[in-house]
Image (cartoon, rainbow, N blue to C red):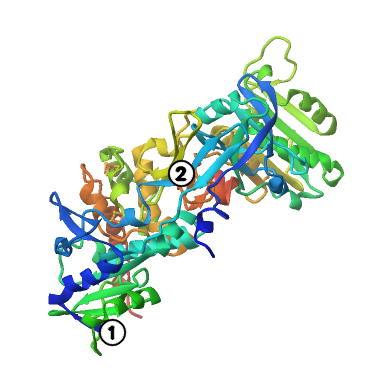
Amino acid sequence: MHSLKKTRLMEFLGTLRARHAVAAPVKRNGVRSFELISDETELDLSGLPEYSAKKFFFPPRELLYGYKVTAKGVEITPAAPPEEELVVFGMRPCDVKAVEVTDRFFLEYGARDPYYAARRKKITVVGIYSAKKGEHFYCDMLGNTFAEGADLILWDAGKHFLVESKTAKGEKLAATARRLLEPTKEKPEPIDCPVNFDRGAVRELPEDDPLWKELGDKCLDCGACTTVCPTCTCFDIVDEPALDGKSGARYRVWASCTTDDFTRVAGGYVFRKDEAARARFRTLHKFDYTTRQYGLISCTGCGRCSRECLTKVAMVDAAIRAGIRKNNAKKNAAGKKPAD
Amino acid sequence: MAEKTVLGDGNWYLPKTAVVKKTVDEAPGVKTLSLAFQDPRQQAFSFEPGQFVEVSVFGVGEAAISISSPPDQRETFDISVKKAGAVSKAVHELKKGGFVGVRGPFGTGYPVKEWSGKNIVLVAGGIGIAPMRSLLKQLLDERHKYGRIQLFYGARSPDDFVFKKELAAWEKKCEVLKTIDKTCTGWKGCVGVVTQYIDEKRVSAENAVAAMCGPPAMMHYAAEQLEKTGFSEGNIFVSVERMMHCGKGKCGHCMVNHKYVCRNGSVMADFEAVKLKD
Ligand code: SF4
Ligand code: SF4
Ligand code: FES
């Protein structure tokens, strides 16, 4: 553990920036998002950025390969892997949790995704935590405790940060700013953020529960929720042919499960036809399916999906409410049990 | 290891060039293409009936297509494609000597190895016959290993049956029930939806397994009918259709509940496939 004076935060960031590209929360045009910075003073840690750092791990449009059809066959030129080291600075516990989720999904669960893997290898994650309650949305309720995903953590401890290296990458990064850090025996207060609702309750709602219709009726199929969600990872694979008609490139681009196109097969059949079914799918994907697949709830509680939604379709809220109701029912039942 | 290999070798998103060796017009809007990988090192390509490949027409896109030839067919493998989306239309335009990109094989196949000594009921509707051909040809190549083999095959009209010539040959080695949607002159076979013929008179669940592929509604009713005759979860195998982009459990398009059809399927045990609600 080291300590870093808050007055030296800019210097710390400057030192990191001298060696690496650094992405950090900044406010531009009134919106906070993670961007590559060229000036430390732009840093804005005032709240959870409206847009997460997902694009640095999984770009909205990513080149897979170029192709060229010749008389002899097809030449495929795979995208070059990123060469530059990147530090993503200032990720809050919920955003770090999102990294844990996407790492688990892209790297460990089933097939390893070579593009995500190549990008991820070059990224060092620096988490930040302040116990001061701000706009935390639901994230206080979802057990985001920096369990995995961060390499280095800056714990807000009043006048200074406690700097904790969690991995060899974090260790290495801290070493580059050693002159600003002082060893300390002080320990950060652990994050108090237990999951105190029944996470699986939403799964038990029947398919025709009015909740799904209520959510679906409001949904405009715009895909804003999946775009801002730090753990939504679905994509399309699309061709972009050049004008010569023989060459071009294939990309993957973010896709949204809230659109009917998402499950439309050639010939026109759509498997998840109505918005209610899609709202249900997205909610259950976050709170049920991924827990069955790889043991993690894939909602971090960041609240971005509800906040960005024009019509305030509150899927996450619904899942949490269902969970709280069930817990309360359990408690009540336990309370009513006659003592023998 | 050099960085470059990360996105080159072992990158399952990259298609390999395959050459069109032969095309056959099977039925209105349905063609079979025999393909061979250009690089002889890829000739070791092996698969199971029911598995699919991602076929690319560059500039148009990729589509998931079942392999329609049996695994023991060497040198080339077949895809049988119905004109439906942009890619399948482009595939239809290909001539002998043309190129496509191929990735795969992906997904699970029918567990044929476990079927020795069993009676087998196959149900196919429309272009769902494509993976069934792969399966049936493999079964018929080792006919002695299995008991009764029945194929229930529904098409819109007599003309719409795919693999017409082969059907005649199959009829000599197994029982084939063909049915068309509406009767027409000269037709002597059955009429109506294929599922209505799956009943206790015709099929027995005794020591039997069933495999099927067709439109979602057909599979739903076929599963129901099979259950009525005593089939149960675990001995009905369904080749499930879904939108697919990546083929390996990453793009999310094919998810049904917590399963990926491309990875946990496309051949799935009955209840999962037809009844897993998402
Ligand atoms: S839930 Fe809201 S943000 Fe998401 S697709 Fe529907 S309208 Fe758009
Ligand atoms: S589902 Fe909503 S609250 Fe949960 S991680 Fe995604 S954007 Fe955040
Ligand atoms: S096809 Fe991409 S996840 Fe199944």
Left or right: where B256 falls relative to A186: right
Residue A141 seen in the current view: no
Residue that extends furthest to the top in the rendered view of this protein: B185
- Kindly identify which residue carries mark 2: B253
What amino acid does circle 2 point to?
A: His
Residue beneath the point at 41% across and 61% down: A120
Q: Which mark is residue A277?
A: none
Q: Quadrant of the C terminus of chain A?
A: bottom left
Q: Nearer the viewer, residue B278 or B166?
A: B166
Above or below for A188 versus A232: below
The answer to whether mark 2 is within 8 Å of ligand 3 is: yes
Q: Do pointers 2 and 1 mark residues of a single chain? A: no
Q: Position of residue B33 (x, y in %)?
A: 67, 30
On what subunit does the disc labeled 2 rest?
B
Residue beneath the point at 75% across and 40% down: B75
Number of dots carrying numbers = 2
Q: Nearer the viewer, residue A129 or B266?
A: A129
Q: Position of residue A13 (x, y in %)?
A: 22, 69
Question: Which SS class for mark 2?
Answer: loop
Category of crowding for the residue at label 2, using alpha-carbon neighbours closer than 10 angstroms: few (below 14), some (14–19), many (at least 20): many
- Kindly identify which residue carries mark 1: A1
Above or below for B70 versus A83: above
Q: Position of residue B16 (x, y in %)?
A: 60, 43
Q: Quadrant of the N terminus of chain A?
A: bottom left
Category of crowding for the residue at label 1, using alpha-carbon neighbours closer than 10 angstroms: few (below 14), some (14–19), many (at least 20): some
What amino acid does circle 1 point to?
A: Met
Residue A119: name its quadrant.
Answer: bottom left
Residue beneath the point at 15% across and 65% down: A134
Above or below for A171 versus A105: below
